[in-house]
C-alpha cells in the first residue's frame, strides 16, 4: 500500500485536484474557481513553452554528439563555453523549471557543473522572448540595467557552484525519482 | 520523457495556482506598492521567492508597482527572486540536482537577487 502510494503519488495528487475542482464548480465554491482560473493561466504558459523544450532536448539528444558538447561547454571550455550556454538559454522560453530537463540533457552529454548553473541563471532571466515583454512594460532602461547587472552575477554563481560541488558526487538526474 | 516531465510539471502548476490564490496580485500590490524601505525590500525578496507567477502576469504587476510609487530596487528584487528562486519548485529541483545543489543554488540566487535589486535601483534612481 505504502509503495503503491509512493509510486502513484503524483497521479493521486492530480486526480485529487481534478475532483476538488469539479466539486468546487458544482457547489459554487469560489476559492476553488479562482485557483482553477490561476491554473489555467499557468497552464497556458506551460503549453506555450513545452513544444519548444521538447524540440530542443530532442534535437540535441539525437544530433549533437557527446564529444561536441564536452568540447564546447565541458570541463575545459572556458569563456567560449560560457557564452554558448548563455546564448542557448536566451533563445528559449518558459519558467525556470522548464530548464531542468534541458540541464539534464546537457549534463548527460558532458557539460561542466559551472556551465549547467550559468545556463540555469541565464534561462531564468535573460530569455529574449521575455525581454521583449519586459521592455514593453518596464522600459528599455530598466531591462538593460537588470540584464547587465544580472549576467556577471550568474556567471559568478556558476563558478561558486562548481567549486562547492566539485568533489561532492554531484550529478543531474532525469527528475523521475 | 514526455510523461516524466509533464506529470511533475502539472503538479507544480497546481501548487503554483493555490499559492497565487493565497497571495494574489492585489496583496502583492499592497505589500510592495509604497513600502520602499528596508522592510519593503525584504518583503519583495521573500514574496518573490515563495511565489511563482507566470511571466506575462508578473510584468504587468511590476509595472503597476512602479506606477504606485515602489522603487526600482524593490521591483527589480521582486522580479529577480520571482524568476530565479523557487520555493514551490524546490522539491522538483531536488529531484534533478539533489538536495545540496538545489538548496545552494536557491540561497545564492536569493542573495544575488538582492544585490541585483540594489544595483538596478542605484543605476536607475541615482545615476539616471
Image: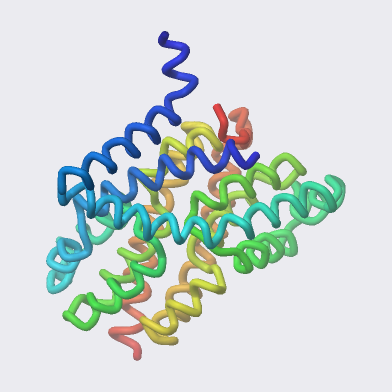
> Which residue is painted at 34% across and 88% down in the image?
B127
Measured from the top left, where is residue A170 in percent x and y? 61, 33
In this orientation, which residue lies closer to the viewer: A80 or B52? B52
> Which residue is painted at 38% across and 63% down in the image?
B80
Measured from the top left, where is residue B53 in percent x and y? 35, 59
> Which residue is painted at 44% across and 82% down in the image?
A135
- Quadrant of the image occupied by residue B82: bottom left
In this orientation, which residue lies closer to the viewer: A152 or B61? B61
| Side of B107 where B41 appears, left or right | left
Q: Name the image quarter holding the C terminus of chain B.
A: bottom left
Q: Name the image quarter holding the N terminus of chain B.
A: top right
| Side of A64 where A173 appears, left or right | left
Measured from the top left, where is residue B86 in percent x and y? 39, 48
Task: Name above or below for residue A48 compared with residue A148.
Answer: above
Q: Residue furthest bottom?
A: B128
Residue B20 visible somewhere in the drawing: yes
Measured from the top left, where is residue A142 in percent x and y? 39, 81
Residue B81 visible somewhere in the drawing: no
Task: Name above or below for residue A137 compared with residue B84.
Answer: below
> Which residue is painted at 49% across and 75% down in the image?
A131
Amino acid at each position: 500500500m505504502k509503495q503503491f502510494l509512493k509510486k502513484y503519488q503524483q497521479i493521486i495528487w492530480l486526480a485529487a485536484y481534478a475532483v476538488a475542482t469539479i466539486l468546487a464548480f458544482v457547489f459554487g465554491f469560489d476559492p476553488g474557481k479562482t485557483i482553477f482560473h490561476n491554473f489555467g493561466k499557468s497552464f497556458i504558459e506551460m503549453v506555450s513553452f513545452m513544444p519548444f523544450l521538447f524540440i530542443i532536448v530532442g534535437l540535441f539528444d539525437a544530433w549533437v554528439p557527446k564529444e561536441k558538447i564536452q568540447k564546447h561547454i565541458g570541463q575545459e571550455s572556458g569563456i567560449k563555453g560560457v557564452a554558448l550556454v548563455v546564448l542557448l538559454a536566451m533563445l528559449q522560453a518558459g519558467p525556470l523549471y522548464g530548464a531542468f530537463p534541458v540541464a539534464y540533457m546537457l549534463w548527460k552529454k558532458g557539460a561542466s557543473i559551472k556551465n549547467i548553473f550559468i545556463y540555469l541563471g541565464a534561462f531564468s532571466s535573460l530569455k529574449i522572448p521575455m525581454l521583449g515583454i519586459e521592455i514593453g512594460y518596464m522600459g528599455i532602461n530598466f531591462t538593460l540595467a537588470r540584464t547587465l547587472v544580472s549576467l556577471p552575477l550568474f556567471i559568478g554563481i556558476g563558478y561558486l557552484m562548481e567549486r562547492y560541488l566539485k568533489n561532492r558526487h554531484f550529478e543531474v538526474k532525469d527528475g523521475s525519482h | 520523457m514526455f510523461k516524466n516531465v509533464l506529470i511533475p510539471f502539472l503538479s507544480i502548476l497546481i501548487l503554483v495556482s493555490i499559492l497565487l490564490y493565497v497571495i494574489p496580485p492585489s496583496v502583492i500590490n499592497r505589500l510592495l506598492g509604497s513600502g520602499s524601505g528596508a522592510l519593503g525590500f525584504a518583503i519583495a525578496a521573500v514574496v518573490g521567492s515563495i511565489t511563482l507567477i507566470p511571466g506575462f502576469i508578473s510584468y504587468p504587476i511590476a509595472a503597476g508597482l512602479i506606477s504606485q510609487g515602489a522603487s526600482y530596487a524593490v521591483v527589480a528584487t521582486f522580479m529577480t527572486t520571482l524568476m530565479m528562486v523557487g520555493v514551490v519548485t524546490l522539491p522538483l529541483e531536488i529531484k534533478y540536482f539533489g538536495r545540496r545543489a538545489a538548496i545552494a543554488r536557491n540561497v545564492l540566487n536569493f542573495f544575488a537577487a538582492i544585490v541585483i535589486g540594489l544595483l538596478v535601483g542605484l543605476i536607475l534612481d541615482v545615476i539616471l
